[in-house]
Image: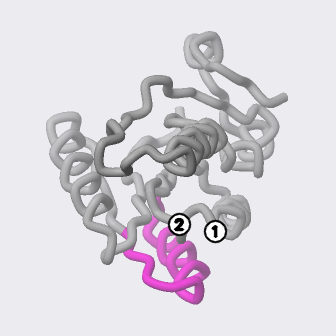
Amino acid sequence: MPKASPVAVLFLPRNPVHKLFLKEMEAAASPLGARVLPVPIGAPADIPAAFEGMARQGVASVLVLPDDPFVIQHRRRFIKMAAKHGLPSFFGLREAVDDGGLMSYGESLTQTHFRAAYYVDRILKGANPGELPVEQPTRFELVVNQKTARALGVTIPRSVLHRADRVIE
């Protein structure tokens, strides 16, 4: 059975949402006996050293926190470095799994862009932006990349595969 801890969490210290996510993850991990290893990333140049450090510390996997343009822009670099170091990688963006990440759970970036287009249309037709309702995502997707799992020698339980919205073979 592969080890499950510690889990490295890549976060951007300048992102206040990432700090909240990290705090909640640490609180949830403690009663389970799991360890969370926070790994700050501030610039693209930090990515290789961060993954080398994680590999030296023997992390079991890496979670890349979502909700930041930096993460979206550099997700392929995160995926490439995770593969290089044999680390299962988890994301909040399904598009990262399309690019070779192991798993994601979160809203679809594509769906978010469609909703943004709806708002732009309403504003261009004269709606007051301050009067438009704030929307939260209502549909979340679990996506699993079996090709990546095989390359890492990871077996995804059938129960997870059956619950997945999409499995990439």
User: Residue 39 or 97: which is nearer the viewer?
Assistant: 97
Q: Amino acid at mark 2?
A: Pro
Secondary structure, mark 2, is: helix
The residue range painted magenta reads 39-59
| Percent of width and height locating residue 54 | 48, 69
Classify mark 1: residues with Cα within 10 Å, few (<14), some (14-19) or many (20+).
few
Q: Determine whether, in the image, residue 164 is placed left or right of residue 7.
A: right
Q: Determine whether, in the image, residue 152 is placed left or right of residue 107.
A: right
Q: Is residue 62 magenta?
A: no
The answer to whether marks 1 and 2 mark residues whose Cβ atoms lie closer than 8 Å is: yes
Instruction: In the rendered view, tell whether residue 110 sits above or below residue 159.
Output: below
Instruction: State the residue position of label 1.
Output: 73
User: Residue 5 or 81: which is nearer the viewer?
Assistant: 81
Q: Quadrant where the C terminus lies?
A: top right
| Percent of width and height locating residue 86 | 67, 57
Instruction: In the rendered view, tell whether residue 138 sits above or below residue 117.
Output: above
Residue at 50% x, 36% y is 106
User: Residue 30 or 22: which is nearer the viewer?
Assistant: 22
Secondary structure, mark 1, is: helix
| Percent of width and height locating residue 22 | 27, 56
